[in-house]
Amino acid sequence: MRKRYYTNFEFYYDENTMDIPQHILESEQLSDAAKNIYIYFIYLITENVEDVLDALSRIDEAKKDLEPGLEELLACGLIKNEIKTNEAGEEEVHYIVTKEMNE
């Protein structure tokens, strides 16, 4: 099944700066693993990486955090996972990075 990765918010990015929502980086509710994976997700999306999860599994600094960090991000709503049908009638998995945590 094809996977798509994107954010539901605008942010600034160049080679020196990433405008990651500060409240997420400072959150005491999130583990370091979750913060690390969140940052990598946004970075890889901006770099137009086709399969973010595959790329994360091959980055030494990210792969140890991938499973626990992604699980935490999905549970708190910072990454949403939805199955949608595309125009060709094929199902796709969408990973949507948000900046709002579940209450």
Image: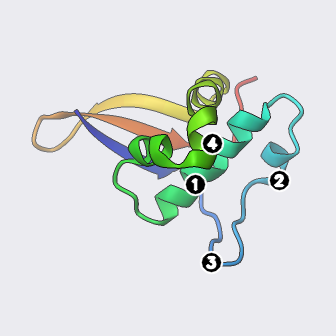
Earlier residue among tags 4 and 3: 3
Q: Is residue 48 left or right of residue 66?
A: left
Disc 4, SS? helix
**Residue type highlighted by circle 1:** Ile
Q: Position of residue 36 (x, y in %)?
A: 69, 44
Earlier residue among tags 4 and 1: 4
Which circle marks residue 37 in the picture?
4
Please name the residue that numbered disc 1 is placed on.
42
Report the residue at 57% width, 47% height from top: 60
- Distance Cα–Cα, label 4 vs label 3: 19 Å
Instruction: Give yes or no for contact between labels 1 and 3 (Cβ–Cβ under 8 Å).
Output: no
Instruction: Give yes or no for contact between labels 4 and 3 (Cβ–Cβ under 8 Å).
Output: no
Q: Is residue 53 left or right of residue 70?
A: left
Q: Quadrant of residue 15?
A: bottom right
Report the residue at 79% width, 44% height from top: 24
**Residue type highlighted by circle 3:** Asp
Which tag is nearer the camera, tag 4 or tag 1?
4
Disc 2, SS? helix
Please name the residue that numbered disc 2 is placed on.
22
Q: Position of residue 77 (x, y in %)?
A: 62, 29
**Residue type highlighted by circle 4:** Ile
Disc 1, SS? helix
Q: Quadrant of residue 42?
A: bottom right
Report the residue at 50% width, 57% height from top: 44
Can residue 98 be seen in the rendering of this structure? Answer: no
Instruction: Give yes or no for contact between labels 2 and 4 (Cβ–Cβ under 8 Å).
Output: no
Which circle marks residue 14 in the picture?
3
- Distance Cα–Cα, label 2 vs label 3: 17 Å
